[in-house]
Amino acid sequence: MRNRLALVTAAAVLLAACAGGPSGSDGGGTRLSMMLFGGPEEVAGYEAMLAEFEDANPGVEVELTPVGNQDDLLAKLATGFAGGTPPDVFLVNFRKFRQFADQDALAPVQPYLDASDELSAEDFVTPPLEAFRVDGELVCQPQNVSSLVVYYNRDLFEERGVALPTEGWTWDDLLSTAEELTGDGVYGLGTEPALIRIAPFVWSNGGEVVDDQDAPTELELDAGPAREALDWFLDLSLVHGVVPPDVEERSEDAESRFIRGGLGMYLNSRKSVPDLRTIDGFTWDVAPLPVAPGGTPVTMLHSDAYCISAGTGNEDGAWRLVEFAMGTRGQEILAGSGRTVPSRRDVLTSPAFLREDVPPANAEVFVSNAEIARATPNVASWHAVEKLADDILAEIFYGRIDREAGIERLLDETRATFARTGST
Amino acid sequence: MRRALPRLLLAAVALLYASPLLLMVSGSLRGRGLPPPRGVEILPGSPTLDAYATIAEVLPLATYGRNSLVVAALAVPLTVLVGSLAGFGIRLLPPRATRWALAATVGALLVPVTAVWATRFELFRLAGAVDTFVPLVGLALVATSPFLVLVYAFAFWQLPDEQLEAAALDGAGPLRLWWSIGLPQARAATLAVVVLAFTFHWSNFIDPLLYLNRQSLFTAPLGLRLLQQLNPTDWPLLMAGAVLTTLPPVAVFLLGQRAFLGDEGLLATAGRWRR
Amino acid sequence: MRGRGASALPLLAPFGIGIALLLVVPALITFGYAFTDHTGFGTPRFSGLGNLRRAFEDPLAAAALRASVLFALLAVPIRLLVAVGAGIALARPRRGARLGRVLVYLPTVIPDVALALVFLWVFNPLYGPVNGVLGAFGLPQPVWLSTAWGARWAIVIMMAFPIGEAFLVTLAARRSLPAETYEAAAVDGASAWQQLRHVTLPQLAPLLVLLAVRDTILSLQVNFVPAYVLTDGGPDAATLFLPVYIFDQAFEFLGFGYGAMLTLVLFVVTGVLITIQALLARRWGWLR
């Protein structure tokens, strides 16, 4: 009797275990797993690329797992590593890869790249490579070189007789443009009050976001040119009212608002392009960020890289996948999704990326941005710093807390987070 | 008047509690990309099923739903098994031990799940069970929630001592007693446990979030979360996703509600449950 | 049935093993990890009271503690009031009673992610029905999820809906009260209110204490999903409940050790709140 009970329980548990299915590699061939964060178009691009990779490598199968946002990606990666089942390859932003690198959880790509017949560092634009280096060694292979740009509703500009943004336009130009566009249910500019949106304005004005790019201990936004830039950015909301107030932003995020025609300009990276391409009511285009008075043109780097998990036994297979994805063909397929700004120089300037049949017409902006894009520090504490900073910046930007007190808090609280360079 | 008022209040509360589901359904029928409604709209002007058609293009919700069903199909029977055995075991204990067992079960109910998130994860990792359904189904080993053990203990209470003793004299072991006397007289409890366990496992969000890495294993709530992240303000689409995710547990609940909310089911047991 | 205790043990074994494996052992390991620098990678190293010191200095940990306690103080009374009130009112067999029970129970079976999404929509400042109703009556329409109290209340209101467990327990408990006492009270000419006050509530008192304890614990942990979906801990950490912060620390920032220490903090907070409840209950004569 007792035995039968044990048997039933065991059977049920066993059944449950089987439902999980196999994972990793087995005798028949290689199974690789890949994880990334991305929207449907982007995921479709990766699926197409992986399909060709599988065709070119019989016996290799890749399972792709897309995750809904960056935070969930990190949580999934953390539990994956902790659980001993990390994806063989994953795509992650340079602002977030370091906590894994510092735990020796990644197999650096530098030796693979050095030994590769297919790829060499010269094939790629520089800023992303720099962003993924730790002590001079390339840890992950950057796959794109997206950057912060200004999307604008061209029809609305013409309707209201406002001059279109041009190369080398200034902060004042952007502000007066935004003011002219605001009204009749339309706001001039949409943006998130986030550190990575503010950073390029700080740099353009000759300031720095942190005290030390390689070993930051605090944000330097309280004085000098950095503070000027921060104030200019905050004024967009607090003084000029050219950005949607909180209640509007909560109801309809800036991107949906832009797509509906309720925004003149919208700050984001290349990420928005697939969604903006669904617009059929008006024409839109991209412009570079405005330059600070007497400042330098610069933008924020947005770049993801293929990281290879260490200790999976699949590192070599994973590199072959990266090699294919970063080859001309692989990058062309991904450029086709509209989401990716290829980091390969030959594809970046090819018709595969600079398409004439679909907007944005001025896609060249992303090409010229590729060399002037700057990165925020890539230390392990950065992700936590950013998360904390963005919460406080939103409070200030939407006028819920006093500006001076808010900035003081911003510095104080992030300083403590920087101090914990490790993760514990 | 003095009688009508409480009744009216009760009706209002009941209606209020039905409203999330109603709002979910009516929200899913709105056309996508319409301007905000003025005032409250019970039903959108020109209801449409567009949002439902779009969902299938955006995410493989059918796969996620099937995964949730597989988890529930394994976990619910196991929950019934573990829960009813434990509930019956408690019934067979001598009075003093019964009190201890009940106290321990209530105590287990009082341990915050958060307290064991990370370390339970470590155990399943050591067992090599991360990225499988095992950790999700494994919860059935604690009868999904100790509460369900209490439901069974509560139901078995009414079994007369004489009947159990007579059967025991005939040589029936505890397992036979459980099978031939306990379970048949606790049908309402079983049905209630099935409903409660199903809704729990279908709805479980945190464990799949922690344990599942491969998209092919994702469950319905994870899929819904993914949908929200991809389309944060597309309300008709999100509400349609919510309706689809909510339909199975609501259906199971409506089918089984008589067992634990009806006057004849589990609640009737309560009337007889006196010592 | 005396003497049958030993033979009951095999029946209890699966559940007992489950509790040991999934509850007791992990809880003990959590206790151990709280004093290490464990990151989820490699071997944890003993770090003494380092994590506790860090928690004391961490403004977000303080914010999380505050958010959790506030939430429990607001949510538990409301949830209990509805669950117990509806449970008592709907317990007696009457026409329409089952329909009422089903409706009250309904939000409990909605998956919490779906329920959270509905409330995200309900509290949408321009599109949402709550502000629609407020606007129709000419009342102010707050930006719910953008202000600290708006966000807190939004989550409290949402959590006032899934109350099925306490509701079910109350239904059953009310049904198990002997009819004779009510008959006696009716003979004495007691009104419905007097019956509730002098017959029903005193008899249910110990159970109510248990429900309050259970709901306090539930409230301190089940707010993970609503906070995760509705507010992501914001604005300005107003809804950064301990479970959300523990999740962030353990799984997003690779601080298993620190997360474990925060879990201990959650344990202690829970213990304190429960003790206060028990003491009050005893003082009011609800518990002997």
Image: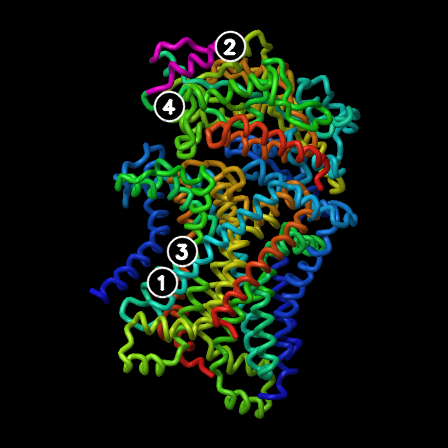
Residue at numbered disc 3: C107
Determine which of the numbered discs, if any, sits on residue C102 in the image.
1
Q: Which stretch is magenta?
A: A160-183
User: Which residue is label 4 attached to?
Assistant: A261
> Which of the pair A293/B53 is nearer the observer?
A293
Co-location on one chain, circles 3 and 4:
no
Identify residue type, mark 1.
Answer: Val
Instruction: Check residue C162 for magenta coloring.
Output: no
For marks 2 and 4, the one nearer the N-term is: 2
Camera-nearest residue between C16 and A220: A220
Instruction: Please tell me how crowded label 2 is: few (under 14), some (14-19), or many (20+) other residues with Cα within 10 Å.
Output: some
Element at label 3: helix
**Residue C252 in view (yes/no):** yes
Can you tell which of label 3 and label 4 is closer to the viewer? 3
Image x and y of residue A160, in percent? 34, 12
Residue at 50 percent of width and 60 percent of height: C215
Image disc number at residue C231: none
Q: Position of residue A3 (x, y in %)?
A: 66, 76
Instruction: Name the amino acid, label 3.
Output: Pro
Left of A174 or right of it: where is C130? left
Cβ atoms under marks 1 and 4 closer than 8 Å: no
- In the figure, is residue B69 to the left or right of A245? right
Q: Chain of mark 4?
A: A
